[in-house]
Amino acid sequence: MSFKTKMIPLAGAIAFAFAGTAAAQEQVVKIGHVGPISGAIAHLGKDNENGAKMAIEELNAKGTMIGGKKVKFELLAEDDGADPKQGTTVAQKLVDAKVNGVIGHLNSGTTIPASKIYNDAGIPQISPSATNPKYTQQGFKGAFRVVANDGQLGGTLGRYAVQINKAKKIAVIDDKTAYGEGVAAEFVKGAKSKGADILVQEHTTDKSTDFSAILTAIKAKNPDVIFFGGMDAVAGPMLRQMKALGINAKFMGGDGICTADLAKLAGDAIGEGQVVCAEAGGVLDAQKKANDDFKAAYKKKFGIEVQIYAPYVYDAVMTMVDAMVQAKSAEPAKYLPFLAKIHHKGVTGDIAFDDKGDIKDGTLTLYTYKAGKRELISVVK
């Protein structure tokens, strides 16, 4: 055996040793993300997940350092199917995987039960889209959200219905979910505060497709506005059936219906300015360029338009990591106090939380639909 042949494994061992040392110095930080990647609103869950992917890829590309060590971020993406039971199952899965933090869930109905599991494990959670006030009213120190809650969103829509749309007679429908019931209840409060008459409050489910009985009964009462607390997958068919029954009332809803896909789901029943909805967030002029740049980068990467909450997911990831960098640690107990006091400049605006975990100075964006596309009405606080 030649000297040269003997040196090859030695050189390989030295290279392996150096590689092992480098790997040991690189810290792996696991970020969990949960949304409905299956089911009727999978398009919204995928939109959220894409926002998380963009953030993770950007953080890794720029070589983020935490406590003087280079960090590799890993995204652990889970599907809760918008189902509370499935939501708690995947929440426990992420806890068992020892994630450093969680971004999610999308729906209030899955976010709220899952939040107890994360809280019990001491893992911080930022929801980019759950709006039911109960989420942050549980007293969990690690529960945050980067969008306005239903009290702000539903109440604003209720007041808008009366003050701007001049509605006097209103019918309300909700899908019996934590989100749908919550936003509908706040809408009713807002509308009543301005003197509107709530003619009827009906209920359906988030899986329903036939609304003929409910809508026929509502038509007989001749409302000015029908408010729906639920998601676009139900709102689209509901609008089609309203048109078929000759109901000309304005149709209003919260962020669950306020998506790019609503026009596709409703077809020509979307009307011209007939639908008014609100996104539980909003970009003021100072952040408009950053938000537009994000949406352009999103379209370039995925070949589709942002549905609604991808920018908020992106900001939620970046906000959580900002807290880790400031704390010089990705350990939940060490970075949580920094997250609670964070001031992060995001693509959706400036992010800071109140003592409950709600975003401070949350904005709302009112939209309508014209020529089959979502059109901005105004950004309000």
Image (cartoon, rainbow, N blue to C red):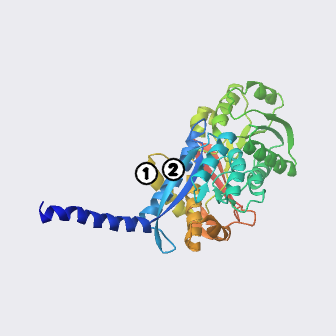
Residue 30 versus residue 229: which sits nearer the camera? Answer: 30
- Name the amino acid type tagged 2: Asn
Q: Which mark is residue 50?
A: 2
Name above or below for residue 184 compared with residue 246. below
Question: In the picture provided, is 294 more to the left or to the right than 44?
Answer: left
Q: Earlier in the sequence, mark 1 or mark 2?
A: 2
**Image coordinates for residue 4, horizontal then vertical, percent:** 14, 64
Question: In the picture provided, is 190 more to the left or to the right than 246?
Answer: right
* Of the two numbered discs 1 and 2 in the rendering, the one whose residue sits closer to the viewer: 2
Name above or below for residue 181 compared with residue 267. below
Q: Which mark is residue 301?
A: 1
**Image coordinates for residue 271, horizontal then vertical, percent:** 63, 37
**Image coordinates for residue 275, horizontal then vertical, percent:** 67, 41
Kindly check if marks 1 and 2 are in contact, taking CB atoms under 8 A apart as contact.
Answer: yes
- Name the amino acid type tagged 1: Lys
Residue 201 versus residue 335: which sits nearer the camera? Answer: 335
Q: CA distance from mark 1 to mark 2?
A: 9 Å
Residue 184 versus residue 81: which sits nearer the camera? Answer: 81
Label 2: few (<14), some or many (≥20) within 10 Å? many
